[in-house]
Image (cartoon, rainbow, N blue to C red):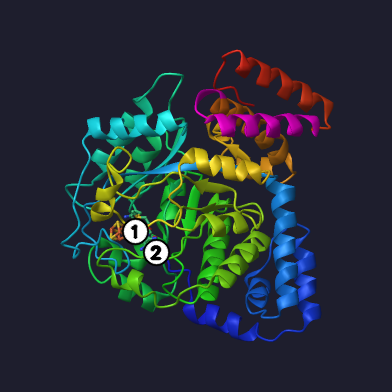
Amino acid sequence: MKDFIDDQLIANILAEAKEQPALRVREIIQKAKELKGLTPEETAILLQTEDQELFMEILQTAREIKRSIYGNRLVLFAPLYITNFCANNCLYCGFRRDNKELNRVALTMEQIASEVKVLEREGHKRLLMLCGEHPTRSNLDYFLEAIATAYATKTEKGGEIRRINVEIAPLSTEEFRRLKATDIGTYVLFQESYHHETYRRMHPTGPKADYLWRLTAMHRAQAAGIDDVGIGALFGLYDYKFETLGLLMHARQLEQDCGVGPHTISIPRLEPAMNAPAAIAPPHPVSDHDFKKLVAIIRLAVPYTGMILTTRETAAMRSEVFDLGVSQISAGSRTNPGGYQEDSSDNFRAAQFNLGDTRTLDEVIYDIATNGHIPSFCTACYRLGRTGGDFMDLAKPGLIQKFCRTNALMTFKEYLMDYASPATLTLGNQLIHSLEEQTTDVKTRRLLEDRLRRIGSGERDLYI
Ligand code: SAM
Ligand code: SF4
């Protein structure tokens, strides 16, 4: 496949988008409200807008779009690192080959099952499984066995993992077929930087040095039948405006070639990491102001693509950007293999990077519920085959609200009954009750009342 990221084209679009009149910016904001997305040229004009009043209008529009498409639910997941062995040397990552101080670990299947049990006993139902890239200590066979182990690991009170998204190095189409056969949810992979020169500098050796092999991974995944794919860029390596346009170019190319764009976009910002020079001094640090701006602009540009925010961000920052367009968040995370069972004092020696939000799942849930968000552990769409284009068909007419809201409330109720602290239980029940009262559609309300009652009497894993 040909390289579809043209650095010069992106630079030109950004240069031409500078200093546009407020009227033009407002026209674009108005167009975004129609939920049809924006072109790269329009997106670039928003990115180049420095006016504070227009910035506030962009944020406000992002909030409105988020509400109208996704409602107030937030889907929760936990990352599960199974090994930190890595043959690559990414300058920003603690797992890089040259970090000789890292405590290298490849979890055994028993250890993976123990990690999963800890997460299940906290209430998690969705995992993102990840690892370094290593020919012998972290290969596909090992990874596939780990997925099977995690799905097979059950705990009391119906504790189980219902969806595993995966984030592993790019595979061939044939290998993606094997991955698809293990029943994964979304295949996630970040391009890190869409800027070729930056990419080359950040990935000096190892298989990851091949920009094009990584860029085209999602096309191969789609060809192998994985129709939910998640893209991302690591913000801080290069100009955030360039990377945002790179993400959009990638999304458009997938839509054009595969008939469906990415299911999610991830927006990680660089965090400090051990012996990782680019993480300790990021070449293009993204300020909090610019981070909010890019989240909001992505929401306007690709309204139906979910956005993922992880515990790299602090609790305060996370609450600020949830409303701007984030639909999935991680909680209670560890980035070192074995970290869920271990004493936290040992974590740093094996971790990929430092975390901004170290709260437990229950603390995060209490916080987001206080702010009126519905914590969701829903896995319905993927289990009912509503993926790829089918998911988009569902999302576009606004049905996402109806299905997802009901499923979110059901899974939240399960969490409250099985895992919540007393304070979260009281708060959560109040929230569910008030949201039930606000459900105006009679059929939906009856359905919701029925399912909540059934969950109250002990049924589990109900979804529509
Ligand atoms: N090794 C695979 C890869 O590189 O694609 C799997 C994912 S890697 C374990 C997860 C992601 O963590 C990387 O894609 C990168 O964007 C991100 N990451 C690495 N170092 C980071 C840092 N210092 N701060 C924030 N994110 C980082
Ligand atoms: Fe390895 Fe991925 Fe870290 Fe690069 S980002 S060193 S590939 S784990």
Q: Is residue 380 visible?
A: no
Residue 168 horizontal side relative to residue 358, left or right? left
Residue at (65, 85) in percent of width and height:
18
Residue 205 horizontal side relative to residue 265, left or right? left
The secondary structure type at the circle numbered 2 is loop
* Residue located beneath label 1 in the image: 353
Q: What segment carries the magenta color? A: 417-438
Residue at (39, 64) in percent of width and height:
271
Is the CB–ligand 1 distance for label 2 below 8 Å?
Answer: yes
Residue 48 horizontal side relative to residue 351, left or right? right
Which x, y percent locates residue 148?
33, 30
**In the orientation shown, which residue stands out farthest toward the front?**
423
Residue 90 located within the stretch drawn in magenta: no
Specify the quadrant of the image occupied by residue 385. top right
Circle 1: residue type: Phe
Q: Is residue 196 visible?
A: yes
Q: Do the residues under discs 2 and 1 have CB atoms within 8 angstroms? A: yes
Which x, y percent locates residue 430?
70, 31
Ligand 2 quadrant in view: bottom left
Q: CA distance from mark 2 to mark 1?
A: 6 Å
Circle 2: residue type: Glu
The secondary structure type at the circle numbered 1 is loop
Decide which of tag 2 and tag 1 comes sooner along the chain.
Answer: 2
Quadrant in which the N terminus appears: bottom left
Is the CB–ligand 1 distance for label 1 below 8 Å?
Answer: yes
Which x, y percent locates residue 412?
59, 31
The label on residue 202 is: none
Mark 2 surroundings within 10 Å by alpha-carbon count, few (fewer than 14), some (14 through 19), many (20 or more):
many
Predominant secondary structure in magenta? helix
Residue 422 located within the stretch drawn in magenta: yes
Residue 268 horizontal side relative to residue 445, left or right? left
* Residue located beneath label 2 in the image: 271
